[in-house]
Amino acid sequence: MNESGYSWPEAMLTLTIMVVIFSTLLPLSFRMLSGLEHKKHEMRAKETLYQGALLYKTYGISEGVRTEEGIDYEWSAENGQLCVTFPSSFSTEMICTP
């Protein structure tokens, strides 16, 4: 024990806890957050697909853009198939109706 009251085992325990936090918990939480962000974009793209289908069936509009939180979800209807394109973290993704 030194003059401030901390011992060597306490220091090692603190260091171990810090290593566990920064080497496992932070990367895990980052991976979870990025996965949730991707799922949120997919959900909004599917909502846009649904809204595009309604507009296509009701008014005959064959393309459009929906902007949500600064991200453009572009939909188009061709040959009876609806597709939505949206930017992802690495590239542009496309979701189409079967």
Image (cartoon, helix red, strand yellow):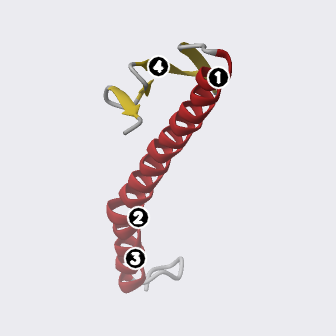
The residue sitting at 50% across, 79% down in the picture is 3
Instruction: Describe the element under mark 1 as helix, strand or loop.
Output: helix
Query: Label 3 amino acid?
Result: Ala
Disc ID at residue 77: 4
The residue type indicated by label 1 comes to Leu
Give the residue number, with chain letter if any, for mark 3: 11
Residue in front for this viewpoint, 5 or 25: 25
Residue 79: give x, y in percent of width and height.
38, 19
Q: Earlier in the sequence, mark 1 or mark 2?
A: 2
Per the image, the residue denoted by label 2 is: 25
Q: Earlier in the sequence, mark 4 or mark 3?
A: 3
Residue bearing mark 1: 55
Answer whether labels 1 and 3 touch (C-beta < 8 Å).
no
Residue type, numbered disc 4 = Ala
The numbered mark, 4 or 2, whose residue comes first in the sequence reads 2
Query: Which percent across, then down, holds residue 91?
Result: 32, 26
Pointer 1: residues within 10 angstroms few (<14), some, or many (20+)?
A: some
Question: Which of labels 1 and 3 is toward the front?
Answer: 1
Camera-side mark, 2 or 3: 2
- Label 4 vs label 1: CA separation? 10 Å
The residue drawn where x is 34% and y is 78% is: 12
Question: Which amino acid type corresponds to the residue marked 2 in the rendered image?
Answer: Leu
Q: Residues within 10 Å of mark 3 (few under 14, many from 20)?
A: few
The answer to which quarter of the image holds residue 72 is top right
* Distance Cα–Cα, label 1 vs label 2: 45 Å
SS type, badge 3:
helix
Quick check: 4 above or below 61?
Answer: below
